[in-house]
Image (spheres, grey):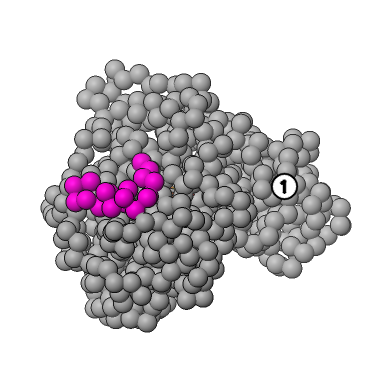
Amino acid sequence: MPKNLTQKILDAHIQSGDKIPGSPVDVKIDQTLTQDATGTMAYIQLEAMGVDQVKTELSVSYVDHNTLQSGFMNADDHAYLQSVAAKHGVLFSRPGNGICHQVHLERFAKPGKTLIGSDSHTPTAGALASIAMGAGGLDVAKAMAGLPYTIPYPKVVEVRLEGKLPHGVSSKDIILELLKRRSVKGGVGKIFEYTGEGVKDLSVYQRATITNMGAELGATTSIFPSDERTLEFLTKQNRAEDWLELKADPDAQYDDLEIINLSELKPAAACPNSPDAVKDIAELKGQKVDQVAIGSCTNSGFEDMMKAAAILKGKTVAPNVSLVVSPGSRQVMIKLMENGALQTFVKAGARVLECTCGPCIGMGQSPKSDGISLRTFNRNFYGRSGTNSAGVYLVSPEVAAASAVAGVFADPTELDYQDSDFEHMTYVDDSMILKPSDNPEEVEIIRGPNIKPLPLNDALPESFNKKVVIKLEDNITTDHIAPAGAEVLPYRSNIEKLSTFVFRNNKEGFDKICKENNGGIIVAGENYGQGSSREHAALAPMYLGIKAVIAKSFARIHLANLINFGILPLVFENPADYDTIDEMDELVFENLDALNADQPLIVHNQTKNLDYALVPQFVQKDIPVLQAGGTLNYIRSMQA
Ligand code: MIC
Ligand code: SF4
């Protein structure tokens, strides 16, 4: 049977399970990555599992999110992460070395490997033909302990790229087109595999923009073949030996097909507040812009920076615009220094930031009230920039740079500038990547006061009555549940404190409501928990006593996180039942000692005197985990 590329790599890593779409399969994981905002929890969990040395081929810990250090908390986290990496066999990429996905792409990702990372944009490495997936920190810890990662066997969508991108149109516009067609929930349960003539004209950096933002489709991951362009990239990174040719067999089968003619694409923008609210720049042209930010793991590669520099060369930023630039890695930054592009940025009036996530996660550079901000990033969820009234638009580096000069939305296709054949990125520097210790037993783990012990859930009772403490609409993101930003992020290792911020933009005092009602139930619409992989969006509600989430549907990573922390994920068998539930209704859950993943659970609404059939979103083997109150409790009970 001819195989597509996804099947070739995935099937070679499947340890058990049926290769039927939707059915759970256990996947062997070759590489892991963590970043600091989710990493502290992942390593606290790894320690709790009693693992001495990681069992993967390669595990890397990056520090790129919380680098503001306004107070001791972030620095405490960094010190903990550096020591725990040294002790357990993990490489440590120091703060400032770059954004995890960019550095991993440049230095470590390999064709044919599997990678999971405690960050939803881990699929970036799909640009180098890895099967790379975002996961909760606990699942990454399990992978480091040598355990497989369980996913529903995906459907594979062929995205056939035809034609050639016109001048001024970039790979950002390809993924925005796909988001426009398929929406933020169109990718759930699917892997997007890119094929066709158009692929060979896309460099690895351009491919990485697409695989990165495939996360916004809700996709399991996205993947490109490993071809001459891949070899070219790896050679420039001094690792040609990591290359192998990988592509789909002729006549390979796919579950679905999407054809995009690159020649017909135009520059586009995702409008506030969703990555799928896509419009052509032509519709926005001339509207005033207040801020432009170039960077983030989506568009901070060497070529992205060079395209922006080509447009900014000899120009000055418009007086009404604040321009910030953050290259994705130190390697890129140094190269830009060498070839003069950094000078171009500074001369144009750009404010150059360190090589981290920065404004993408609301760590500084929040726009002014009602400000219009054009960003080369991947997410524009409500409030994420730190200014709730701001309008954030997601655009290519070309649109960003052109608009920074014009002071209004501008169309780069109308400008004359060099858009290819840049002197290629050949600078390699691993000096800020620390190797693990040769004497791990001598390494002492540094635990400052911000590193709090991990809270654990109670075992699931046989029955309980709980109130609906919040009722939410469709597409609730993990940014709604556990917000990010400079005020909150320092508490990622301190769940008690973090829990006071849960749903703060949806319901003031949510934590107090939970405390007064001894926990509760969350009710939500479609695609609950989309966006970030942060397990804090399950952990903090668990800490507040949330026992179940009843939704119309769930996003993949958040669903796994709920199970990991012992919260029951359930969907309405009859979606119309959603309309009959109100906040503060009291729900009765019974017979939980006899949970069956294949049968609906009947839950009684005592307030309305109604019964609901709720379909379990877990499989039979998750039941002991849920009954134990989560994965760590379960692992401990097995060890006892
Ligand atoms: C994000 O882009 O939302 C983040 C911050 O990188 C998250 C991880 C986190 O919350 O720490 C992600 O994408 O998983
Ligand atoms: Fe960092 Fe933003 Fe990328 Fe998340 S999306 S990893 S916050 S740059």
**Disc 1 residue type (three-letter):** Lys
On the picture, is 471 further left or further right than 457?
A: right
Disc 1 C-beta below 8 A from ligand 1: no
Mark 1 falls on what kind of element? Answer: loop
Where is mark 1, residue-wise? 507
On the picture, is 331 further left or further right than 319?
A: left
Where does residue 565 sit, x and y in percent of width and height?
A: 57, 41
- Give the residue displayed 35% in from the left and 35% down from the top: 95
Q: Is residue 341 magenta?
A: yes
- Give the residue displayed 66% in from the left and 48% down from the top: 505
Circle 1: is it few (<14), some (14-19), or many (20+) Cα within 10 Å?
A: few
Task: Please tell me whether residue 96 is drawn above or below residue 23 in the rendered image.
Answer: above
Does residue 599 appear anywhere in the picture? Answer: no
- Give the residue displayed 74% in from the left and 57% down from the top: 602
Q: Is residue 73 magenta?
A: no
Task: Please tell me whether residue 520 is drawn above or below residue 168 in the rendered image.
Answer: above
Nearer to the camera, 430 or 451: 430
Does residue 401 appear anywhere in the picture? Answer: yes
Task: Please tell me whether residue 540 is drawn above or below residue 385 in the rendered image.
Answer: above
Quadrant in the rendering for residue 76: top left
Read off the magenta span. 337-354
Q: Give the main secondary structure, helix, strand or loop, of the magenta stretch.
A: helix
Where does residue 348 sit, x and y in percent of width and height?
A: 34, 53
Nearer to the camera, 223 or 291: 291
Where does residue 280 sit, x and y in percent of width and height?
A: 47, 74
- Give the residue displayed 81% in from the left and 49% down from the top: 584
On the picture, is 321 further left or further right than 478?
A: left
Nearer to the camera, 500 or 206: 206
Q: Quadrant of the N terminus?
A: bottom left
Total labels drawn: 1
Where does residue 625 sit, x and y in percent of width and height?
A: 55, 43
